[in-house]
Image (cartoon, rainbow, N blue to C red):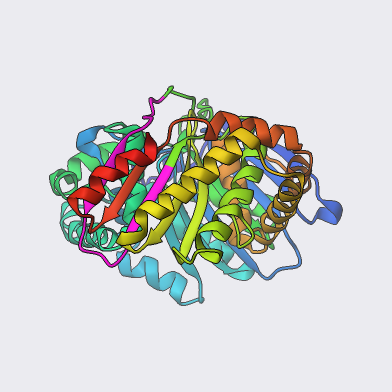
Amino acid sequence: MTSRSSKATARPSSEARAVARTQTLIKGMNGIGTVRKTTLPGGLRVVTETLPSVRSATFGIWAHVGSRDETPSLNGATHYLEHLLFKGTNRRSALDISSALDAVGGEMNAFTAKEYTCYYARVLDTDLPLAIDVVCDMLTGSLIREEDVDVERGAILEEIAMTEDDPGDCVHDLFAHTMFGDNALGRPVLGTVDTVNALTADRIRRFYKKHYDPTHLVVACAGNVDHNKVVRQVRAAFEKAGALRNTDAQPIAPRAGRRTIRALGKVELLARKTEQAHVVLGMPGLARTDDRRWAMGVLNTALGGGMSSRLFQEVREKRGLAYSVYSYTSGFADCGLFGVYAGCRPSQVHDVLRICRDELDHVAHNGLSDEEIARAIGQLRGSTVLGLEDTGALMNRIGKSELCWGEQMSVDDMLAKIAAVTPDEVRSVARDILGQRPSLSVIGPLKDKQAARLHDAVA
C-alpha cells in the first residue's frame, strides 16, 4: 500500500461507509470481557476486548505474513520489514515515532513469527488515540528508504550474531531445519547473513506492498477501550493514508494447509565451543486447527511442562543431569512440532537423550496415569488464565485468533475444552505423536565418537 495525503482520496463515499459490519463475538457480563469485531470497507478487521476495570490499553496490528511466505532469496525479508516500519513515515521520523510513546510512558515493539507479524503499543487508556495514530501511521506510511535499509542491515546482522551466540535459542532454529529442511518453515525467521546482505530496498518495498494490504491485516485492542471509538480512530488513520479505497475488498481467509513434508529419524549436529550441549529431540506434532490439540496440550504439560512433569523429575530432580529440561509444541496451519529440549554437560548428553527417549517411548506405549493427566489439566487451566492477566496478552489472544482461526473463543470455553479432555484422548494422541521415530538436533563441543553415537538416539 502507498501513503497518500490527498483529502480527495481520503474521504470515502457515504455508500462505502454503510458497509462496515459490526458483530459481538463474545458477550461478557456487564460488558466486561466483551469481544466485538467490525469489518471496515476495504477488508480491514478491528477486534476489541473491553475491560473497564483497568487503566491501560494495548493496541496491535497483526499482518498475515511470516517467514514461511518468503522465497529462499527473500529469507529474512519479513523480519527486516518489521525493523524498517519503525524508521519513519511521511508524517514522522524514527525519533518522532519512539519519542511519541516515550513521552507518555508507553511501550512499543513488534515481533515476527513464521506465519504472522505483530506491531503493538501499550499505553494508559487516555493515551490510546496517540498509540492508534502512531502504529497505524507506521503500517500504512512506511517510507522504506534505501539509506534506512542500509543502516538497519547492520542492526539485523548483529541480531543474527546475538542469536547464534545463544545456543539454547539457536538449537530451536536448527531443529526446525532438521524437521523441515530447506522448506520455508525450516528457514530461520531472521534470515541468514547472506540473504540479509542480498536484500535491497526495492525488493523489501514490493514485499511490503504485497503483504500489508488492509485485507491482510487485523487490528486488535484490549483494555479500558470503547469499541466504536477505536473503530472510528482506526478508520480515520487508514483513510488518511488512502488505504481503504478498494471498498469491495474482503478479508483474506485464515491460512490454509500445504501438507508440509517433515523428516523422521534425521540427525543434525552443529559443533560449537560451548560449556553445555544443547539438544532437541522431537517429532511431527499437530496443526493448530487439529481437534486433538487440547489433548496434546495436556500431554505436553504432563511430559515437560512443569516441575512435577515426567521429564523434569527424571532428568533433573532424580539425576541432576540438566538444569533446564522441558517439552513444547508448535502448531502451524498445516502441521506442527513436538520437541524436548535439554541443556547438559557434553559428557552427559547420551544419558540425557536415553532417559528422554525412554520416557517418550514409555508414554507412547503405556500412556500416562489418570493422576498425571488430572494434574496436567489443572496446571494447564491455571496457566491459561494466569497468562491472560494483562492487556497485552488479551490483545495477542484476540488478534491471533482472528488472524489464524477467523473466530474467537472465550476463556470459559477454553477452560471447558481443557477440562473435557479424557485420559483415553491423551493416551491416543500420545500413541500417534510419540510413537513416531524422532529426529534430533544438537549444538555443542561433541567429539567424533560422541557424534557418531548420537544417531543411536533416533534409531
Q: Is residue 80 left or right of residue 73?
A: right
**In the displayed structure, does residue 136 sit left or right of residue 227?**
left
Q: Position of residue 359 (x, y in %)?
A: 54, 45
Where residue 255 sits in the image (x, y, percent)?
49, 29
Near-viewer residue (288 or 326)? 326
* Residue that protrudes farthest toward the top in the picture: 259
> Residue at 34% of width from left, 64% of height from top?
345
The answer to whether residue 429 of the structure is visible from this angle is: yes
Q: Percent position (x, y) of residue 6?
A: 38, 45
Q: Is residue 286 visible?
A: no
- In the image, residue 339 above or below residue 152: above
Q: Position of residue 11 (x, y in %)?
A: 50, 41
Residue at 39% from the left image edge and 29% from the top image edge: 262
Q: Is residue 106 above or below residue 141?
A: below
Q: For residue 145: magenta? A: no
Q: Is residue 19 found left or right of 197 in the rendered image?
A: right
Residue placed most toward the observer, 121 or 311 = 311
Residue at x-position 80% and y-position 45% = 27
Specify the quadrant that holds the N terminus: top left
The quadrant the C terminus occupies is top left
In this rendered view, identify the residue nearer to me: 234 or 217: 217
Residue beneath the point at 78% across and 44% down: 419
Is 373 in front, or is 155?
Answer: 373
Q: What is the magenta range?
A: 260-281
How many marks overall?
Answer: 0
